[in-house]
Amino acid sequence: MVLLRFAPSPTGALHLGGLRTALLNHLVARKLGGKWLLRIEDTDNTRLVAGSVDNIRHALDWAGLHYDFGPGVGGPHGPYFQSERLGLYHSYAKKLLEARHAYRCFCTPSELSEIKDRFHKMGSTATYDRRCLHLTEEEVALRVKAGKKSVIRIHDASVPERSIPPDLIFGVLKNAQLSLPTDPILLKSDQFPTYHLASVVDDHEMGITHVLRGEEWLPSLPLHLSLYACLSMTPPQFGHLPLLLNPDGSKMSKRMGDVQVAEYISKGWEPEAILNWLALVGWGNRSGQASGKEQHGKSIPDVFTLEELERKFDLSALTSRRGILERTVLTHLNKEHIKRKVHEPDGLHSLVKKAMPILSSAFIGNQFVQENYVGLVVIALGTRLVNILDIATVAPYFFVDPDWFSDTAMKMKAAIPHMIYKRSVEQSIEDFSRINSSEWTHAPLATQLQNTRTTLNCSSKEIMSPLRHSLTGMKDGPSIINTIELLGKERTLERLQRCATANFAFA
């Protein structure tokens, strides 16, 4: 069975790069008819951050990336925390020792630092002189019995001949073995494995067929392939994902708050938009390239749900170039996904659920902050909302009276000739008063508005501008008919009457 894994370290909140890695593992697994698991690589006690695992699982659940096996789900490959698999790593380290592919090193940190400095002064890239390699079995046994701390190192010179297969993304790779430390450590003195030993052992034991991980692990690939060769195991297919960059070209860091998934959750971004955004970086089907969509001379990013990505994503079309996450692309995608959700019952419900706390806080005790009405407001604003959390500022007039004395409202009023404003508002009051509340729907309202224009013998702008000012106090918004319908008869007439009465004050 095709099986992939997402294997983060619980060293902090999940960041965008990690979520992208999880997403691509999910997409490739689904594309190939396989599954994927979550494995927590918690073998470095010095870097563990409390709450990280919960944060990772919450972020994946929020994004809709549901792993098939792992913490909280179970499965045949557990345990899924590396800290609970130490015995397994020790057994493999013992195999390497017995086959003389590895050896114990008893050198202290100060000794190792001295050795490394000496090599550096000589102009050598070596980091260790292998002095412990020459210890006899008796000497090793005596030191172990005496309780002297040791690490286990791979013996580079004993590695069987092996090749480096093409990377799924980077293609043919150079052998970077010489860039690695001399005889890298596999098992630390605290008896915990390094990433190199643990990941190789777990990928083999769990039956992982494809490994998709960050580009930063490319230099370690020769070591990992050496371990597979030393243990006579077949390696999985490797694909290394190019790094994500900030707009200024710098490397994104998980220590920066604006790259943490939790920040995007708290700021109201749609999970579908975030996944869409991450999937398009470096993919040949991004920015309209595949579909040929263009608007005003600019390419338009393709809008995909997770299900659509599962069908369309092609790993072979992913470039090896590092990609920049453009915030303008996310803004466009978020707006488009909101527009889609407005027309889907579950999607609309999720938008309303996110909007309610914002509106309740902005308009405390307001009688219109009710789910059914908020749903109608979201529908009316669907094409204008960039982020659902903007609803209180984009269209406050659906919940409270407009601020007719704001700078925007005053400029709107100043741009409308006094008599045109007065005639339009007063005639609208007279005409809309004739419509019964039970008939306060789009068609009768549109008909009556046309009758008002006919009576006044005025242009569309001469009637629409006064109505938009008096009903909303804002330049942009849904159509006047939709706004009037949603406000209802009582609030519409009340606002028109107040503006008619105060018209001279506005002049």
Image: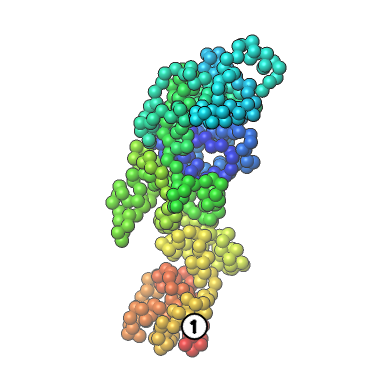
> Which residue is painted at 53% across and 52% down in the image?
258
Q: In this rendering, is residue 183 above or below 407?
A: above
Q: Residue furthest right?
A: 146
> Which residue is painted at 37% across and 29% down in the image?
166
Q: Is residue 265 visible?
A: no
Percent from the top left, x then y, of residue 504?
A: 49, 89
User: The disc labelled 1 sits on which kind of residue?
Assistant: Cys
Q: In this rendering, is residue 161 above or below 220?
A: above
Indicate left or right for 377 with 110 as reference: left
Indicate left or right for 135 with 199 as reference: right
Percent from the top left, x then y, of residue 256?
A: 55, 49
Q: In this rendering, is residue 178 above or below 337?
A: above
Percent from the top left, x then y, of residue 321?
A: 38, 42
> Which residue is painted at 55% across and 22% down in the image?
129
Q: Residues within 10 Å of mark 1 (few under 14, many from 20)?
A: many
Q: Is residue 41 visible?
A: yes
> Which residue is painted at 64% across and 29% down in the image?
110
The residue singled out by tag 1 in the image is 499
Percent from the top left, x then y, of residue 127?
A: 54, 27
Q: Nearer the viewer, residue 141 or 208?
A: 141
Q: Quadrant of the N terminus?
A: top left
Q: Residue furthest left?
A: 292
Q: Nearer the viewer, residue 118 or 172?
A: 118
